[in-house]
Image: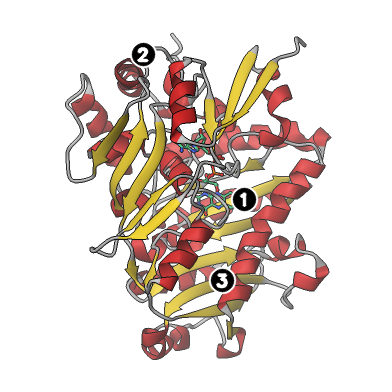
Amino acid sequence: MKIMKLNKLTLKSIADLRSHILSKTPSFYHSSMTSTVIPYDSIESYLSSIGIAEFTMVDLSTMPNFMEINERGELVISGAVTWKDAKAFCRSKGRDIMTSPTEELACILAGFATSATGERFFGFGGLREQVVSLEYCNAKAETCELQATKPIEDYTDLTEYQKSYEHFSEFKNAPFPRMVQETDLLIGTEGQLGVITGATLKTTELNERTYIFIKLPKWEESIKPHMEVFHKVQAFRDQVFSCELLDSNSLKVLPSEEQVSSSGDLIFLEVLTGSFEEVYEKLLGEFDFISEEDIFEISAARCHALRMNVPRYTFERNARMGVVKKGTDVQVKSANFEELFEIYRSWTKLGVEYNLFGHFGDAHLHFNFMPTKEQEEVCQEQLLQLYKKVLELGGSPFAEHGIGLIKQKFIKNYLSSTQYDFFKVLKQEMDPENIFFPVGYLNLKEKA
Ligand SMILES: Cc1cc2nc3c(=O)[nH]c(=O)nc-3n(C[C@H](O)[C@H](O)[C@H](O)COP(=O)(O)OP(=O)(O)OC[C@H]3O[C@@H](n4cnc5c(N)ncnc54)[C@H](O)[C@@H]3O)c2cc1C
């Protein structure tokens, strides 16, 4: 295999960024490097394996950051602000952010690039709807502003592209980005059209929350109780902000001091404390398949640590085994959720270690294979089959982590000339010299 050349650069100011853009070096601009669809741990061998000879990684995580709450209660940020920083800052001002990706060390501006969602999507919807404006550096190194209230410019092929998105409008993200409002240009396009340097986003008032755990049997044995929670919780989206699942295997990846005493699965709910009594009376006390003894309260900190550490330890485990992440990010319609569980159940018979966790209330779960090197091929084949099935079900294959490099091989059945043609128009208009993430999905070619 030919050795590829990997260049790394760190930027510390907007002036640095401008001069790098003006150098016209094709580059991949990254922030905290928590994306699960870029194989950061094995980037050189991965790029070599797909025939890339040279790649430049530009680190934005040390760009000076700034945060402010404006007179409308919106959060104004620039630079490398993480979700953790923003949450703490908003709280100190009596406000709260409405998007909460499980990995808090990810940067907010990168979150626009990946169209991040996360736990609170259940109660508050997506980041795309919370953005007021975005600021970015274009291919001429000029600073530009995009407003959420303005429709996107009428590019060639836009109408047909917009029509093709309609099928996915109820999902968090489609296999291709939405293009309706101006800000959509930089949301979910993974840094392929410019470098995001600042944003204004809506916040909500800071209210006390209560965190509830519900113990359930293992989903492999029965999903009756799980489905009861799923169906009943839907009517409480204005009082329950998150509804997440950690299965029994997810809990096993945790070190012993972080373990929870449960032999089965756990669902946790983030409930508005002011509504807790009503939620208890109308939801938690009304389950047919779950006893009240299996419902208990835990602290916000404990709940959060658990939820965040499960995926972290899962990814670490895969990195230790030297395998590229083999996980799903599929969201289906409520009516198809049981079918998705059936597919995942069939995977439990393969003799490959696995766990299942994620955004249960939105019918959006991450099944993670934890294979040995020898088992990687089997898992890859299963994933290919899954994506065919998800296409038939009309589900969304990549609902929040994006496409990056790893998921490009799964995307082709979801795209047609409508999307390929429009991607070409976007690249030609906004990045004619292909300097922004040149091997990203916008440059994929339709096979004859
Ligand atoms: C444990 C764990 C849990 C996770 N949970 C969630 C979750 O609940 N919800 C969710 O949505 N994601 C989740 N993710 C995925 C990941 O955190 C998100 O994709 C996140 O948005 C990546 O942020 P980052 O700063 O690490 O970006 P990076 O990995 O550094 O970059 C990601 C992408 O964004 C582009 N990019 C980065 N910064 C910029 C910029 N300033 N301008 C333009 N493009 C840019 C990069 O080119 C790249 O394509 C999780 C990941 C892990 C490891």
Classify the position of the N terminus by image quarter.
Answer: top right
Residue beneath the point at 51% across and 17% down: 26
x and y percentages locating residue 382 in the rendered image: 64, 37
Helix, strand or loop at disc 3? Answer: strand
The earlier-in-sequence mark between 2 and 3 is: 3
Q: Residue at x 40, y 91 (%)?
A: 277
* Residue located beneath label 2 in the image: 432
Do the residues bearing badges 3 and 1 touch, measured as CB atoms within 8 Å? no
Q: Residues within 10 Å of mark 3 (few under 14, many from 20)?
A: many
> How many circles with numbers are drawn on the protein?
3
x and y percent of residue 243 in the render?
A: 48, 68
Q: Amino acid at mark 3?
A: Ile
Which quadrant holds the C terminus?
A: top left
Q: Earlier in the sequence, mark 2 or mark 1?
A: 1
Front one among 13 and 355: 13
Q: Amino acid at mark 1?
A: Phe
Q: Are marks 2 and 1 in contact (CB under 8 Å)?
A: no
Q: Which mark is residue 267?
A: 3
Q: Crowding near pointer 2: few (<14 within 10 Å), some, many (20+)?
A: some
Q: Secondary structure at mark 2?
A: loop
Reading the image, the residue beneath label 1 is 367
Q: Is residue 177 visible from the viewing direction of this image? A: no
Q: Position of residue 8 (x, y in %)?
A: 64, 26
